[in-house]
Image (spheres, rainbow, N blue to C red):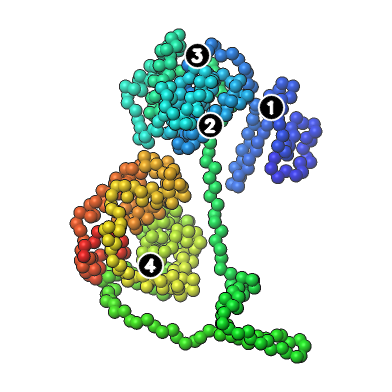
Amino acid sequence: SLHCDRENPYIQWQNSPFYVNKSNREWKDSEGKPRRGAVSAFGMSGTNVHLVLESYPREVQAVNGALPSYLLALSAKTEAALTEKMADLIAFLESPEGQEADLLEISYTLLQGRQHFRHRWAMVVQGREDALYALKQAINKEQAPNLFQGQVPPSFTGQTAIIKYIADLLEQSHVSRKDSQQYQESLMALAAMYCQGYEMDWAALFAGTDPQSLHMPTYPFARNAYWIAEKEREMPLSSRQKGDLPSEEAVQPDRKQTEVIQQESSGQRVLTPLTAADTWSSEPKAKPEAIPLTSLERDKAGKGKHQLSRDVRDIEQVLASMLREILELDQDTVDRDTPFIEMGMDSIVGVEWIQAVNERYQTSLTANSIYEYPNIRQFAALLSPDTPARAEEISDARSNLAPSVAPAPKPSDQPAADSMEAVQAFLVTSLAEALSMDQADIDLDGELVELGLDSIIGVEWIQAINERYGVELTANSIYEYPHLREFAAFLHDQLSQQMEVPLHLQKLIQGVQDGEIDIEQADQLLRRGGIRT
C-alpha cells in the first residue's frame, strides 16, 4: 500500500487472514486456495470504490485435436507500434511461457481477446517455427503468400456481399478442418479481408475447440516524454552574482583604473568614484530623419472598430453588454461581481467572448484570462489602459492599428500557396503543433476527433487557419468535414474561389482608405501574395 507507515491499531491483523502489503513481493498460492485481494480508492469528491479480486484458476487442458493451420493477427494505431507488436510476439514465442502455450490458444487470444485497430497484419501458419519465420519476414519487409497487411480507411463500411461471405466462411470453418488445404485457403481469405477492415465474429472460428485466453504482450504504448521547458527569468541587476556581471575590461576596455580613495578614519566605507560606464546621459538621442507618411482617416480605416475607453466603468458596461449578448441573458442577470462561470460561461463560449474582446479593444488575451480575472469588475481592470500591466500592451495595440504595408513576395520566391499539397502540408503542420504531436503521427485520412482535436483546441486551430489564409471559417467546419483530407479539400475550394478575381494593389489601398476593406484583411491578403501591381 502507498504511504502506509503504521497499520491501524484498531484492526486485529494477527487474527485475520488479511495483511497490509507494504513492499513489492511475489504473491504465492497458499494450500491450493485462490488468492484474493482488496483494493480501495477514494476520490476528492468523496467517491470511493472497493474492489475484491480473485486469482484466475489456470486449468491446463488438452485442446481437442490439433488444427491444420492457424490464423494469427496483430493490429495497432500506428505502423511503428505494429512493428513493435511483431517484435513482442517473437519474444513471447521464444520465451519459456510461450513455448509451452498452444498455438490455438495464442490465435484465440490475439483474435478474440484484443481490440483491432486500423493498422493490421495477419499470417496463416502451421506451427510455432513457421510463425517465428513469418514474423521475422514481416519485420524485414519481406513478402510471402501467407502474410497480409493493410491500413483500414477511416470511413470503411464494407460491402454487404463480402460480409455475408465472411459469415459463411466462419460458419463452415469447423467443417473444412477435415481438408487441410481447404481450411488453409479459408483462413487466408479471412486474413485478407481482416486486413481490409472487415470485423468478424471470431468465436465461430473456434467452435468446438474450447480454447482459453493466455497472458500475452499487450499494446506497446508510446514512451514519449513532454516535459515543460523551464523559462529563464531575467534576474534584477541588484540580485545577480558578481560573477555574472561583465568585467570592467569588457564594458570599457580602454578605461584606466581609478584610484581607490581610502578613508583614514575607522568605520567608514571604501568609496569608488563613478565612471563613464556607471553613469547615464540625459541628453536626448538624435531623432531619425522624418519619413513622409500618408495618414489614414480613422473613421474610415477603422470602420467598425471601437475606440478604447480609459474609464473602467465604461469598460464594465461594454463587457456586460457583450456578455449578455453571447450568453443571451437579461440585463438584470448580469452582475459585475458574479463569476463568469456562475452566469453560464463555459470554455467554448469563453473562447468566442475573448475573441470579441480582443477585436474590440485590440488586445491579445487568451481564454485563461477568464479564470485569472473571473468577473466583470476584475476583467475590466485588466483591460483598463490606466493599469500599469496593460499600458504597454494597449499602447502597442494602438500603434499597430495602422497597417505596415510591405511589398508582396515575388511569385518565384514562394510556393503556390493555394495548391492542394501546400494546404495539406500546412494543415498537418499546424494540427501537429496544436495537438503537441509529431507530424508523422498525423494521418491525412484520419478523423480529426480521433486525432485528439476537441472543441477548444478546434477553435484555436481554426483561428490559425483563418489568420494564415485570410478566410473566415468557423469551428463547425471541423464537424462538417471530420476527416483531415476532406477538410483540406474544403479549404482548398474556399481559397480557389477567393483567388478567381485578382486584386490590384492600388484598389486594395483605396479600399482600406475608403473603409471598404478591413486593415487586418488587407494585411492577410498582402502576406498571401497574388496581388497585382
The x and y percentages for residue 11 are 77, 37
Circle 2 Cα neighbour tier, 10 Å, few/some/many (<14 / 14–19 / ≥20): some
Between disc 2 and disc 4, the foreground one is 2
Q: Nearer the viewer, residue 509 or 47?
A: 509
Report the residue marked by disc 4: 362
| Residue 18 seen in this snapshot | yes
- Residue at (24% x, 59% y) in the render: 530
- Residue at (48% x, 59% y) in the render: 368
Q: Is residue 89 above or below residue 224?
A: above
| Residue extending furthest toward the top | 178
The alpha-carbon separation of the residues under discs 4 and 1 comes to 66 Å
Between disc 3 and disc 2, the foreground one is 2
Report the residue marked by disc 1: 35
Confirm or deny contact between disc 3 and disc 2 (CB under 8 A): no
Side of 170 where 421 appears, left or right: left
Q: Amino acid at mark 3?
A: Leu
Between disc 3 and disc 1, the foreground one is 3
Q: Earlier along the polypeptide chain: callout 2 or callout 4?
A: 2
Between disc 4 and disc 3, the foreground one is 3
Q: How many marks?
A: 4
Q: Earlier along the polypeptide chain: callout 4 or callout 3?
A: 3
Circle 1 Cα neighbour tier, 10 Å, few/some/many (<14 / 14–19 / ≥20): some
Q: Is residue 273 above or below residue 48?
A: below
- Residue at (54% x, 56% y) in the render: 229
Q: Is residue 516 above or below residue 140?
A: below
Q: Amino acid at mark 1?
A: Arg
SS under mark 3: loop
Report the residue marked by disc 3: 67
* Circle number at residue 234: none
Side of 347 where 473 appears, left or right: left
SS under mark 2: helix
